[in-house]
C-alpha cells in the first residue's frame, strides 16, 4: 500500500505463540510492510458488520475501510512506535494482528483483531492471558480500549479480570485495566 509508513525494523524475536494458538497451527511474527494489504483486509473484515446496513456500493465501502485503515496505521506507528506489531499466521495466511506496547508501569494492548472465522476460538483470550503472565512477572498491569458496543469482547476481557474504568475512555471506547494479583 503506497504512502503508508513502514513498520519498525530490527525488532527482537517475537514471543512464542501461546499453546492454544500452536495447536491450531497459528504462529506469531513481527508485521512487515508486505503484510499491509492483508492487514487492510483484516481491518475491513472487523468493520463488515457495522458497514453491512449502509446502502453504499462495495467500492465505496472498500475505499472507506482502506482510508480508515491507513489513518489507524499512521496513528499506531506515530503514537505507539515502540510497540510489538505482531501478526498471527495460519500457514502463510494472515488471520489476525496483536499490537502490544510494553511500559514501565503497565502494558497496553494497542490492538487485537482476528478474521471473523477465527473469532470465538480462544485465540484472543490466549494472547491476552499470555500477556497478563508476562506483565505480572515484573509487577506490571495490562490495559486496553474496547468499542463500547463490542459486548462480546468486553465479556472476554471481564472473564480475564479486566475492569472498566471511566478515566481514559471516550464516547466510543471503554478503557479497561487488569492489575496483577498482589503477592
Image: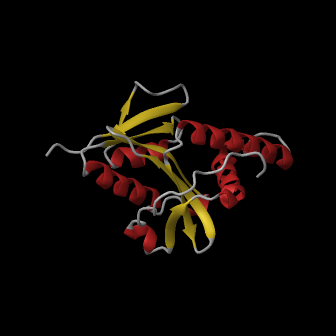
Against 17, is 116 above or below? above
Colour mode of the rendering: secondary structure
In-image side of 48 versus 130 (left or right): right
The front one of 166 and 12 is 12
The residue lying at 75 percent from left, 41 percent from top is 67
> In the figure, 72 relative to 6: above or below?
above
Name the residue at 58% across, 75% down.
Answer: 91
Residue 84 lies left or right of residue 53; in this view the side is: left
Q: Residue at x 46, y 28 (%)?
A: 169
Q: Position of residue 62 (x, y in %)?
A: 79, 48
The number of callouts visible is: 0
Name the spot of residue 27 as percent of width and height, x first.
50, 69
Q: Residue at x 77, y 41 (%)?
A: 64
- From the top left corner, tell me how far across and down residue 41 is, in percent: 70, 55
* Residue 55: % across, % down: 82, 40
Q: Residue furthest front?
A: 10
The vertical placement of 154 against 165, above or below, is below
Amino acid at each position: 500500500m503506497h504512502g503508508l509508513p513502514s513498520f519498525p525494523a530490527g525488532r527482537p524475536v517475537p514471543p512464542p505463540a501461546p499453546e492454544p494458538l500452536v495447536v491450531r497451527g497459528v504462529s506469531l511474527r513481527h508485521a512487515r510492510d508486505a503484510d499491509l494489504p492483508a492487514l487492510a483486509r483484516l481491518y475491513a473484515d472487523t468493520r463488515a458488520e457495522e458497514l453491512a446496513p449502509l446502502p453504499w456500493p462495495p467500492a465505496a465501502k472498500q475505499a472507506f475501510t482502506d482510508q480508515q485503515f491507513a489513518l489507524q496505521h499512521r496513528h499506531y506507528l506515530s503514537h505507539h512506535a515502540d510497540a510489538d506489531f505482531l501478526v498471527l499466521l495460519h500457514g502463510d495466511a494472515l488471520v489476525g494482528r496483536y499490537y502490544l506496547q510494553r511500559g514501565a508501569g503497565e502494558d497496553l494492548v494497542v490492538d487485537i483483531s482476528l478474521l471473523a472465522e477465527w473469532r470465538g476460538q480462544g485465540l484472543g483470550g490466549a494472547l491476552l492471558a499470555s500477556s497478563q503472565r508476562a506483565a505480572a512477572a515484573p509487577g506490571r498491569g495490562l490495559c486496553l480500549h474496547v468499542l463500547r458496543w463490542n459486548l462480546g469482547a468486553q465479556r472476554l476481557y471481564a472473564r480475564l479480570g479486566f475492569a472498566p474504568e471511566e478515566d481514559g475512555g471516550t464516547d466510543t471506547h471503554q478503557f479497561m485495566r487488569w492489575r496483577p494479583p498482589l503477592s
